[in-house]
Image (cartoon, rainbow, N blue to C red):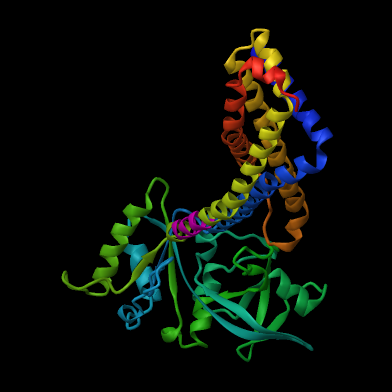
């Protein structure tokens, strides 16, 4: 009960210090405010960005693997491209062999992408990503149709001249007219639209299926020489099968299909989204360290400001301390009284910094492609760091106050 009373008394003293010495207090707390703002704003931006990136990566599916010519490498400056440049691209026949032999793969799809111009009457779009996909692409990658339908098995196998367009392609080429059943011109050929993808918006990586055109891969292979175009086989695991199990089986099948001897290295890469996630986690760890360094200097200045306030406060209340000690106040009581005051002042500076971060997150979302969220963990971190700075900065002044001789303190004429 006495401790609670002590805390309230300390808050009252700190509040009076704020009111009486406004300029001095504001200038002293500015360092804490800037420090907490620097650290928490960095954490808020990059926590929000990390969440957006992970959500984007997870949308690809955690149970899918990508069989490609090139391995993904995050954060490596010495990429040994010469080891991979002569590897063959994955083929449709290899995907078919995987589906035939594998016991771990549920679905698989082959795809590649090129950029072409698309035309409808007097309207055109330059440099549109045209994604050539095999039949089961919709089973390994998540997407929704706004209108129309997906390719049938016969249409894919028969290399039908049909396509599915993104929402932005529909808007730019048809300008409000229903595109289903109409034909656009790509590769110098007329291709009929059978579906429109549901609008998704731009991802944090700056890409979007809203401006894609999907065509059957067999139709594309009749128009394009895909030998020098980067192809990918995407495989999705059956329920209960881990990526490691699927990877081991795929490695054996691919080596068998490509007739590699036991001593030969794999001439293919099996990539998964976990590589990207780990790479970004390392990047964000470095950025967090930079945030701590930048904010740390401001917190150091803020700590000296709090210490300055407390030294002045002790000096101003020397007589009062002497009276308290002559009436039986213990040293720890005086020590805690001034410590609570230092912590309270520091927390005020931290709260101001957090308030500025919150305002910026509210108005800053329009400047970025992801939601800025000031999380409870970051709020708690800001308050805890502020309290620790107050505790450290206020300890020496509080210790000095608790060691004052009561007689000499009461004689002070300050």
Q: Residue furthest bottom?
A: 188
Q: Residue at x 58, y 69 (%)?
A: 151
Q: Quadrant of residue 45?
A: bottom right
Asked whether residue 347 appears in the rendered view, the answer is no
User: Residue 127: x and y, percent?
Assistant: 64, 84
User: Residue 406: x and y, percent?
Assistant: 64, 15
Residue 342 is left or right of residue 222, and the answer is: right
Q: Is residue 337 above or below residue 92?
A: above
Q: Quadrant of the C terminus?
A: top right
Q: Quadrant of residue 14?
A: top right
Residue 226 is left or right of residue 333, and the answer is: left
Magenta stretch secondary structure, dominant: helix
User: Residue 278: x and y, percent?
Assistant: 44, 56
Near-viewer residue (204 or 255)? 204
User: Residue 84: x and y, percent?
Assistant: 33, 78
Q: Is residue 254 above or below residue 174?
A: above
Q: Is residue 280 magenta?
A: yes
Start-end of magenta stretch: 278-287
């Amino acid at each position: 009960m006495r401790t609670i009373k002590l805390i309230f008394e300390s808050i009252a003293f700190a509040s009076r210090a704020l009111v009486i010495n406004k300029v001095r207090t504001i200038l002293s707390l500015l360092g804490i405010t800037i420090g907490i703002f620097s650290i928490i704003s960095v954490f808020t931006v990059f926590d929000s960005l990390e969440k957006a990136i992970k959500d984007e990566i997870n949308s690809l599916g955690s149970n899918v693997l990508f069989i490609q010519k090139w391995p993904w490498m995050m954060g490596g400056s010495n990429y040994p491209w010469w080891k991979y440049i002569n590897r063959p691209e994955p083929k449709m026949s290899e995907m078919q062999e995987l589906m035939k032999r594998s016991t771990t793969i549920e679905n698989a799809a082959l795809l590649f992408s090129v950029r072409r111009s698309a035309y409808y009457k007097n309207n055109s779009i330059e440099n549109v990503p045209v994604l050539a996909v095999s039949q089961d692409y919709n089973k390994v990658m998540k997407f929704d149709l706004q209108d129309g339908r997906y390719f049938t098995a016969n249409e894919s196998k028969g290399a039908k001249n049909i396509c599915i367009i993104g929402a932005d392609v529909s808007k730019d080429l048809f300008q409000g007219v229903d595109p289903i059943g109409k034909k656009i011109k790509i590769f110098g050929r007329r291709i009929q639209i059978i579906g429109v993808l549901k609008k998704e918006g731009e991802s944090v990586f700056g890409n979007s299926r809203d401006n894609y055109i999907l065509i059957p891969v067999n139709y594309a292979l009749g128009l394009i020489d895909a030998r020098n175009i980067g192809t990918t086989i995407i495989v999705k695991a059956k329920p209960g099968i881990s990526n490691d199990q699927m990877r081991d089986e795929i490695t054996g099948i691919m080596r068998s299909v490509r007739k590699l001897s036991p001593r030969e290295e794999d001439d293919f890469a099996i990539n998964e989204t976990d590589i990207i996630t780990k790479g970004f986690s390392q990047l964000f760890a470095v950025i967090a360290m930079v945030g701590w360094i930048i904010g740390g200097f401001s917190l150091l200045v803020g700590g000296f400001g709090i210490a300055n306030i407390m030294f002045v406060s002790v000096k101003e209340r020397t007589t009062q301390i002497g009276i308290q000690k002559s009436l039986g106040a213990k040293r720890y009581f005086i020590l805690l009284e001034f410590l609570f005051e230092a912590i309270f002042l520091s927390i005020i500076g931290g709260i101001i910094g957090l308030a500025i971060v919150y305002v910026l997150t509210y108005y800053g979302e329009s400047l970025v492609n992801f939601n800025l969220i000031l999380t409870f963990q970051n709020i708690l971190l800001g308050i805890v760091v502020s309290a620790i700075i107050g505790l450290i900065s206020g300890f020496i002044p509080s210790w000095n106050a608790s060691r004052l001789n009561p007689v000499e303190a009461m004689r002070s004429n300050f």
